[in-house]
Amino acid sequence: MASVVDAAGEPIPTSSVLMSAAKHIEIKCLSENVEFLKCKKKDANPEKCLDKGRQASRCALGVLKDLYHRCKDPMEGYVGCMYYHTNEFDLCRKQQQAFEKACPLE
């Protein structure tokens, strides 16, 4: 499996990385995501919500970076399992528990 981060240490938001961090992103980026969804609901023109979309994306990438720096090994184990098992949560519960123990949901 490829690394969770690129050479510069920035998170690579692959599906397995995003799925593994979904609960953390949900909690930490709730307001940004709600604002983006409200904007999309209010105006179908994609240009009108670019700023809100950037804020939501920036928040998610920040969460990924923080998780990687705080819980590198458990995160890589969980992401690797999710990648190998095509994002099947049920097959990665052991790695998920280790990851959530190292980086508890706040």
Image (spheres, rainbow, N blue to C red):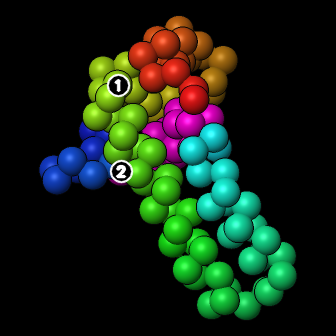
* Residue displayed at 52% across by 21% down: 104
Residue type marked 2: Ile
State how far apart marks 1 and 2 are (Cα): 16 Å
- Badge 1 element: loop
Circles 1, 2 touching at the beta carbon (< 8 Å):
no
Q: Pinpoint residue 75: horizontal percent, then vertical percent.
A: 39, 26
- Badge 2 element: loop
Query: Of 61 and 84, which appears nearest the observer?
Result: 61
Residue at the far top: name it: 94
Residue 12, labelled with which disc?
2
The earlier-in-sequence mark between 1 and 2 is 2
Residue 16 part of the magenta-drawn span = yes
- In-image side of 58 versus 65 (left or right): right
Is residue 79 shown to the viewer in this render? yes
Query: Of 18 and 57, which appears nearest the observer?
Result: 57
Is residue 81 shown to the viewer in this render? no
Can you say which quadrant of the picture contains the N terminus?
A: top left
Residue 71, labelled with which disc?
1
Dividing the picture into quarters, in which one does residue 90 lie? Answer: top right
* Residue displayed at 27% across by 52% down: 10
The span shown in magenta is 12-25
Query: Of 10 and 70, which appears nearest the observer?
Result: 70
- In-image side of 61 versus 3 (left or right): right
Residue at the far left: name it: 7
Total marks placed: 2
> What type of secondary structure mainly makes up the magenta span?
helix
* Residue displayed at 73% across by 61% down: 34
Q: Pinpoint residue 47: horizontal percent, then vertical percent.
A: 62, 90
Residue 15 part of the magenta-drawn span = yes
Q: Pinpoint residue 7: horizontal percent, then vertical percent.
A: 15, 50
Residue type marked 1: Cys
